[in-house]
Amino acid sequence: MNEIKLDDYLFLLFSALLIFSVALSLSKFSKKEEKKRVVTVIRCEKCGKEEVREWREGDYIGKVVGTCECGGRKYIALIYAEGEEKKERKLLGI
Amino acid sequence: MQNVQDMLSIVTQILFITFLLMAFTGMDQKLRMIIWARGIRMGLDKLEEMTRESKEELEKTLRNLGAKNVEEIVEKIMDYFTISPVDIEPTDITKRLGHILRSAEYRWRELIDRALPNISKHEKWNILVMMEITNVLNTIYKIIRHYLYYALKNNNIFIIMQLWMIMPEIMKMAEGYRKAVDAFKDGKPIGDSVGPAVAQRFFMMAKRKWRPAEDTVAGEVEIEGRRVYVIKAEGPGATVGNPGEAVERVVEELGGNVDLIITVDAALKLEGEETGSIAEGSGAAIGDPGPEKIRIERAATKYGIPLHAIVIKMSNEEAILEMKKEIAKAIDKVFDMLKKRILELPKGATAIIVGIGNTSGVGQ
C-alpha cells in the first residue's frame, strides 16, 4: 500500500494558497453602505432652547424660522449629517 | 493512490517548468501588468459611470429650472480648461492668476445667465458648483484613461504600476466629488462651510450689513465696547466669494485702524487627527490658489495688523460632503473662542473676523 508523502501535502497546501490568493485579488470586498440622515437644529436666540428635526428643503444655517415661547427669535443653528460610520473589512487587521 | 501521486507529480513538474519559463522570458511581468491594468480598467469604468451620473444630474437640474440648450451648455463645460499664468516672470502673478480664474468664472456665469435669466443668485451658485464637479470628474476620468492607454501602447509597466498604486486614492477623491453633487444640489452645508457658519453667528448680532466685494458680505458688530467686522461669502448659495478683496477694502475704509484680523477656515487634517478638532495659528487660513490670500496678507502687512487663524480639521472628502456632526459641533466652540479673543482686546479696539470657505447652506 502506497502512502501519501509529505511532498504531496505541501503541494496541496501550496495549491490551496495559490487559489485563495488569486480569488482574494479578484474578489471585491463588500462594503457596508453608510446610512446617513441630515438633521436641522433650531435654537432660540434668547433662551438657547434647542429642537432637532429632519432637514427640509429650503433650510439653511441662520434662517429665522419662528418665535420661541420666551419671545426670542428661533433660527437654524446647525445642519449636519449623522449616521453609522462605514465599516471597512480589514485583511489580517492591517 | 499511485495514480494520484503520479498525477500530482506531473502537475508539480508542469508548474515548475511554467514558473521557470515565465521568470526567464519576462512573462511574469507581463502577467502582472495585465492584472494591474485590469484593476485600473475596473476603476476607470467606475470613474466613467460617476462622470455620466454627475452629467445627467446636472442636465436634469438645468432642465427642471427651464433651460433649453442644456446639452450645449453641459458639453461646453465638460472640457473647459484654464491655463496657468507664466511663472518664469513672477511679477504680478497672483493678479494675473486671479484675472484668469475670474475670466473662467464669468464665462460659466454667462452661460447660465443666458440659459436661465430668471433664477435666483443662490440657485445659480449651486449650479455653478455642480458644473465644476462634473468638469473635475470628467478631467480625472480622461487623465487616468490617457495614462492607461499610453502605458499599454508603450508596454510601460512602471506607469501601470504607479497608476495601480494611486488608484484607491483617486477613486476615493472621485467618489467624494460624486457624492458632493447631491449636497450642492440640495443646498446643504458642507464641511468647508464651517468658516462661514462661524461668521454667521456674528451676523446674528450685526447692526449693519453691506457688500464690500462681489458675492461677499460684511457686518458690523459691537461686543462689549469692541468693534468687530465680520466677512463671509454671500449665502446660502454655494460660493466662496472674494474674502481677500473684502478684507482689503474694509481695512482701507478703516484707514488701517484695525487691531486684529482672524481668519476661520476648514483645514486638511493629518491622518490620526480627529475630525472637528480645532487649532490656532498665525497667517491667513484660506485655501485659494493665491489671489485672495495675498490680499489679506498685504492688507495686514501694510498696516502691521496681527494676522491670526483658527482652523477646524477635516479630511478632503469631509470638506466637500454634507457637514458632519463633529464639524458642526466645532462651530459653537470656535464662536466662543473668538468672543473670548475679542474680549482680550482693550475697549474701543477693532477686529476683523473672516469666515473662509464655501457658504453652501449658510446664510447671514
Image (tube, coloured by chain):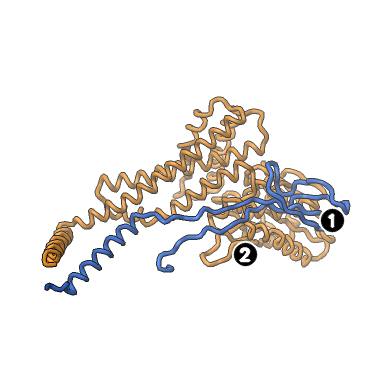
Chain colours: A blue, B orange
Please tell me whether mark 2 sits on a helix, a strand or a loop: loop
Q: Which of B87 and B239 is in front in this view?
A: B239
Residue A57 in view: yes
Which image quarter holds the N terminus of chain B? bottom left
Please tell me whether mark 1 sits on a helix, a strand or a loop: loop
Q: Position of B44 compared to B110: left or right?
A: left
Q: In front of the other: label 1 or label 2?
A: 1
Residue B53 in percent (x, y) is at 49, 39
Q: Nearer the viewer, residue B2 or A43?
A: B2
Chain at numbered mark 1 = A
Q: Position of B289 compared to A1: left or right?
A: right
Residue B275 in percent (x, y) is at 59, 62
Q: Nearer the viewer, residue A71 or B231?
A: A71
Q: Against A55, is B23 above or below?
A: below
Q: Do the residues labelled 1 and 2 touch (CB within 8 Å)?
A: no
Residue B231 in view: no
Which residue is found at the position 56% from the left and 66% from the top? B273
Residue B6 placement: quadrant: bottom left
Residue B147 in percent (x, y) is at 34, 47
Residue A13 in percent (x, y) is at 25, 68
Q: Position of B268 compared to B225: left or right?
A: left
Q: Which amino acid does label 1 sit on?
A: Lys
Q: Against A17, is B35 above or below?
A: above
Say the numbered circle drawn on residue A46.
1
Say the numbered circle drawn on residue B169.
none
Residue under circle 2? Answer: B277
